[in-house]
Image (tube, grey):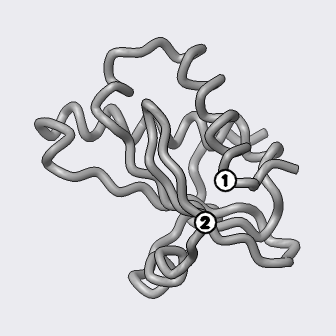
Amino acid sequence: MSQNFKRSVRLLKKVEFQEVKKSSNKTRSLYFWGQARVLPSTCLPKLGIITTRRLGPAHERNRARRLVRELFRKNILKIQNGTSLIILPRKNILDSTYKTLEAEFIAFLGKLQTLK
């Protein structure tokens, strides 16, 4: 599997974000808040990440984004095709281990009903 985060699996346009935000399928956990929109499609799942200044300084926001991208990339095969996700990392993400985050991410996807 490729080790990069391709444009084809990213939400890039404001319209794409707005479509997902219209969805009522949302949940939160200790480490993430997110929304999902699942359409019957054969295209790969897509991810949009929103980090606000409330999370902390730029280097912490960047680290949180990198962690979420890596969690998504490693678990993309477990997510239904045609899914669009918006994830907002929460402050606790910076103090946790990767194994804990991965287990929580899979449980988070289960709450959003986006797992295969």
Asked whether 53 or 73 is in front, the reply is 53
Side of 76 relative to 3 (left or right): right
Spot occupied by residue 51 in the image (x, y as percentages of width and height):
29, 51
Q: Position of residue 29 (x, y in %)?
A: 49, 37
Q: Name the residue under label 2.
A: 25
Which amino acid type is shown beneath numbered disc 1?
Leu
Residue underneath mark 1: 112
Q: How crowded is mark 1: few (under 14 residues within 10 Å), some or many (20 or more)?
A: some
* Cβ atoms under marks 1 and 2 closer than 8 Å: yes
Instruction: Report whether 94 appears left or right of 13.
Output: left
Q: What element carries label 1?
A: loop
Which secondary structure, mark 2?
Answer: loop
Choose between 9 and 17: the one closer to the eye.
17
Q: In this view, does 93 lie above or below 1?
A: above
Q: Which residue is drawn at 57% across and 50% down?
A: 5
Pick the quarter of the image with the N terminus: top right
Residue ID at (43%, 32%): 31
Exactly how many numbered labels are in the figure? Answer: 2
Marks 1 and 2 sit apart, C-alpha to C-alpha, by 6 Å
Q: Is residue 33 left or right of residue 77?
A: left
Q: Is residue 98 above or below residue 8?
A: above
Please indicate whether residue 100 sits to the left or right of residue 54 in the image: right
Residue drawn at 60 percent across, 65 percent down: 25
Residue 38, image x and y in percent? 73, 71
